[in-house]
Amino acid sequence: MDTDFDETYVLLLLADSNLPTGSFVASSGFESYGTHGFLSLSSASSAGKGRAVTAGTVAFIQDSLHNYARSALPFVSDAHHIVDSFKDLEGKLKIDHDAAIEKLLKLDELYETMTLNHVAKRASKAQGVALLTLYAKGFTCPSGLSDEDHLSKSLTDLMDRLKWMVRGEKTHGHLPVCWGVLTGALGVSLLRAQHLFLFLHARSLLSSAVRLNTIGPYSSQQLLLHSVRPLVEAEVSQNKDMRTGIFVDMHPNGANNRPAMTWPLGEILAVRHDLQHSRIFNS
């Protein structure tokens, strides 16, 4: 089977909005952003207000994407590299489970420390463990269909071990780390994993906007194709080589090229999510 076709097929599966990852319950601060009046910047007319809300939605996506790419994408990259180093072209293990788990736990703990508000932490953990569960229940080979090779079994054991550590509260299981682990285990290239990670974040924000009735479904598709696409591509291009810096042997980089939060207003609004009198999302 063609390797490029295999990867494309896996990407189509991962891009399916019906995947049970729990992302539908998270707005990543968008609901609070609207509640606090940042979407409607003009009320001169109904049409003017509609345009202002659309512009406000795009502005939120742009700021949120930039912040998420700078703060989360390095963790995706390092986690992907850890799993990728777990195997070589012949399928032989290069590092054992303990070494891989230890590095993933360090990544997870650093992301927990860098995530500034409890609302974002809650959503990230819920979606992260959902990805690990998805691999075990949705991407492993069904019993009786065919025999797993040694590498597949070893990757399944690694994912299961990480999942049970999250369930046992021995680690946090944050979304960027688990996404890097999942895509690495499925054989998705790092660049494709980074691109899909940011695309799904942007699509989730637009889905939240539709359910909050700030934009319509057709408008959402228009924005996703014409307005969001260049934003996603720009962030991937700018941050694809960024790493956390805690594993110098992987990809050394300067102190100014490390993960960081870039949007203080978004953090403030996100942490106020639970203070809304009524809400439909958990973040």
Image: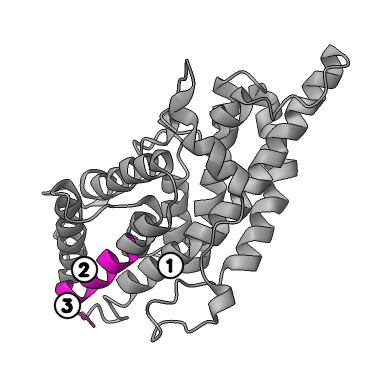
Which residue is pictured at 44% across the width and 77% down the height? 245
**Mark 3, residue position:** 96
- Based on the picture, tell me whether residue 36 belongs to the magenta stretch: no
> Disc 1 marks which amino acid?
Thr
Q: Quadrant of the C terminus?
A: top left
- Tell which of 240 and 191 is nearer to you: 240
Please tell me whether mark 2 sits on a helix, a strand or a loop. Answer: helix
Pointer 1 residue:
3
- The residue identified by callout 2 is 101
How many angstroms separate mark 1 from mark 3 (CA)?
26 Å
Mark 1 Cα-neighbour bin, 10 Å: few <14, some 14–19, many ≥20:
few
- Residue at the spot 69% in from the left edge and 30% down from the top edge: 38
What are the residue bounds of the magenta stretch? Answer: 95-108
Label 2 CA crowd tier, 10 Å (few <14, some 14–19, many 20+): some
Q: Which element is circle 1 on?
A: helix
Instruction: Report if residue 102 lies within the magenta region.
Output: yes
Q: What's the CA distance linking mark 1 and mark 2?
A: 28 Å
Percent x, y of residue 89: 32, 81
